Amino acid sequence: MNELDLDPGMAAVVAYVREVHAPISKAITEGATVTGTDCAFLSGAMDALLGAIDARLPQPEQLAVALKAVA
C-alpha cells in the first residue's frame, strides 16, 4: 500500500472532512434523518478537500511541460 504524505494544510482539511462526516455517518447508521444543513456542511468540506488536492497537483501547462521533458 502506498502511504499518503500529508502536509499540515492537507491534514487539517482531511480532519475537517472527518469531523463533518462523522455525525452524518452516525445518523445514517442509526436510521436518523440527515438534514439539508448536514449535506451543505459536507459539501463545503468536500469542496475544501478537492481544492486542497487541486492546489497540490501540477497545473495543466506544468503537466504538459513535464510530459514533454519525459518524452
Image (tube, grey):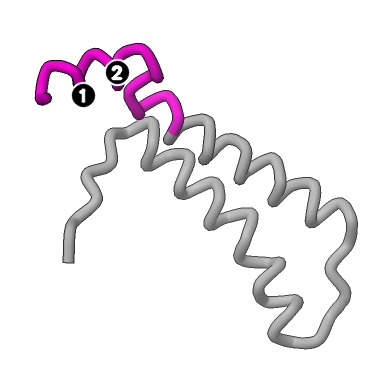
Q: Quadrant of residue 25?
A: bottom right
Q: Say whether residue 58 is magenta.
A: yes
Residue 61 in the figure: left or right of residue 65: right
Question: Residue at image x 64%, y 54%?
Answer: 20
Magenta: main secondary structure:
helix
Indicate the position of residue 35 as horizontal and vertical percent values: 88, 62
For numbered disc 2, what is the local secondary structure?
A: helix
In this view, 26 is above or below 63: below
Question: Residue at image x 10%, y 24%?
Answer: 70
Label 2: few (<14), some (14–19) or many (≥20) C-alpha neighbours in 10 Å:
few
The quadrant in which the N terminus is found is: bottom left
Amino acid bearing label 2? Ala
Label 1: few (<14), some (14–19) or many (≥20) C-alpha neighbours in 10 Å:
few
Indicate the position of residue 39 as horizontal and vertical percent values: 79, 55
Amino acid bearing label 1? Leu
Q: Residue furthest front?
A: 71
Query: Circles 2 and 1: CB distance less than 8 Å?
Result: yes
Mark 1 — residue? 67
What's the mark number on residue 64?
A: 2
Q: Quadrant of residue 30?
A: bottom right
Give how far apart the Cα atoms at labels 2 and 1 are: 5 Å
The magenta segment? 54-71
Indicate the position of residue 65 as horizontal and vertical percent values: 24, 13
Question: Residue at image x 67%, y 76%?
Answer: 26
Residue 25 in the figure: left or right of residue 67: right
Question: Residue at image x 43%, y 35%?
Answer: 53
For numbered disc 1, what is the local secondary structure?
A: helix
Residue 17 in the figure: left or right of residue 24: left
